[in-house]
Structure formats: C-alpha cells, structure tokens
Amino acid sequence: EDKVVQSPLSLVVHEGDTVTLNCSYEVTNFRSLLWYKQEKKAPTFLFMLTSSGIEKKSGRLSSILDKKELFSILNITATQTGDSAVYLCAVIQGAQKLVFGQGTRLTINP
Amino acid sequence: DTEVTQTPKHLVMGMTNKKSLKCEQHMGHRAMYWYKQKAKKPPELMFVYSYEKLSINESVPSRFSPECPNSSLLNLHLHALQPEDSALYLCASSHGLAQHTDTQYFGPGTRLTVL
C-alpha cells in the first residue's frame, strides 16, 4: 500500500529556533514530492522536488530529496510566529494522484 | 496568477437538501481535483478531471456528483448528505500534463456542515 509518513506529528519551538521536518515515502510509480503549508484553509505550495540531492531554497525555508533512501526534509531557520502551520508532504504518484502524509503541526512560541 | 477560487466559503445544509460547490481557475490548467479534508487529517482525493473528462473517482458515494462544464469550472453537486460528510472541501488545479512536474494549486475551500 502506498504511504507517506511525516515526523514529528507535532512540534513546538521558540521563535528563532531552527526546525527540521521529515517525510518518508513508499509509493509505486513515484514522480515528485511536494511540500505544502496549511494554515486555516488552503494548502499553499512551497516546493516541488524531483531530483535527488538538489536543495531547493526560498528565504528561510529549504528542502532536499533523497530518492535512494526515500525521504525528504524541510528546514526552517530563524523561525517566526508566522511559520506556525501544518506542513504537508505529498507525493505525486502516476500522472495525477497526490498521496499526502498526515502533516506536521508546527507551533512557534514568541 | 496562481489563484483557484471556491464558493461558497461556508455552507450549512440539511440531509434532504441539494446544494452545489463551485470552483474556478483561470490559469489555463486542464486538470482539476476535488478533495475532502476532515479536521486534523490530510486532504483525501475524491475526483480528478482531466481535459474536462472524469479520470479518477476514488470510490466516492453517489451522493457526491462532480461536473466539469468547461476547462475553467468544476462543480460538486451534493444531495442527501450525511452528518459525517461535514468537512472542508478543497478544489485544486494543475497543468494537466502527464509529467512529474504537475504541481497542484489549491483553492481556499468550502467548509461544509451537514445537520
């Protein structure tokens, strides 16, 4: 059965800390891995990762994929209260199907 | 413009009502999706439309009926729903090419409550 597993499920840190979120997957016909941030409503797109070992960066966020070990990490440095959200990892399987992990609920305390 | 819009934002309906959720995108995307998301759970795929044709139905009960009138619009018709169908219904769209770079962009969702 295809699955995407995120860890930790919940994380509480102080503003300014660096966090690492993990995503491992076992999916047939893997295409790409996506990271989304979900606050109150719609998941907003962060990164798409297709190739191993190539880091994607956007401001304080970065992510990398390891297709040999079947996992990805999302790093957030110098965290701010606005980073508080659920971070979803999803794998594109086949042509169009997204398989989501359970999400990591990140809380940044001032 | 990476915007997907959904209406209404909130919907409360009884079990005998008929209602519709609407989704629209003007990015020229040819694939559109409906997801259902329960509290503290990830989105679950319901339907995929590709080039206005239904390509994936994830064994969704017939009380949910999707419709794609044109490449920009996606509807979800609701009839005889159950209280357990209460959830956030998310629409998404993507370019629709059968390639691995097909990022899905989500709308803000409709929060549905079935009484």
Image (cartoon, helix red, strand yellow):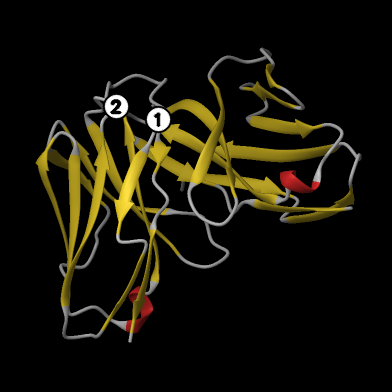
Amino acid at circle 1: Thr
Residue at the image point whose x is 89% and y is 45% from the top: A15
Residue A32 seen by the camera: yes
| Near-viewer residue (B84 or B28) | B28
Residue A14 lies left or right of residue B47; in this view the side is right
Tag 1 near tag 2, CB within 8 Å: yes
Chain under numbered label 2? B
Q: Position of residue B26 (x, y in %)?
A: 26, 31
Q: Position of residue B51 (x, y in %)?
A: 14, 31
For mark 2, what is the residue?
Answer: B27
Can you tell which quarter of the image residue A55 is in? top right
Determine crowd level at label 1: few under 14, some 14-19, many 20+ residues with C-alpha closer than 10 A: few
Residue A95 sits above or below residue B36 on the image: above
Disc 1/disc 2 C-alpha distance (Å): 7 Å
Can you tell which quarter of the image residue A48 is in? top right
Outermost left residue: B69
For mark 1, what is the residue?
Answer: B2
Q: Position of residue A82 (x, y in %)?
A: 73, 46
Residue B19 lies left or right of residue A67; in this view the side is left
Q: Earlier in the sequence, mark 1 or mark 2?
A: 1
Chain under numbered label 1? B
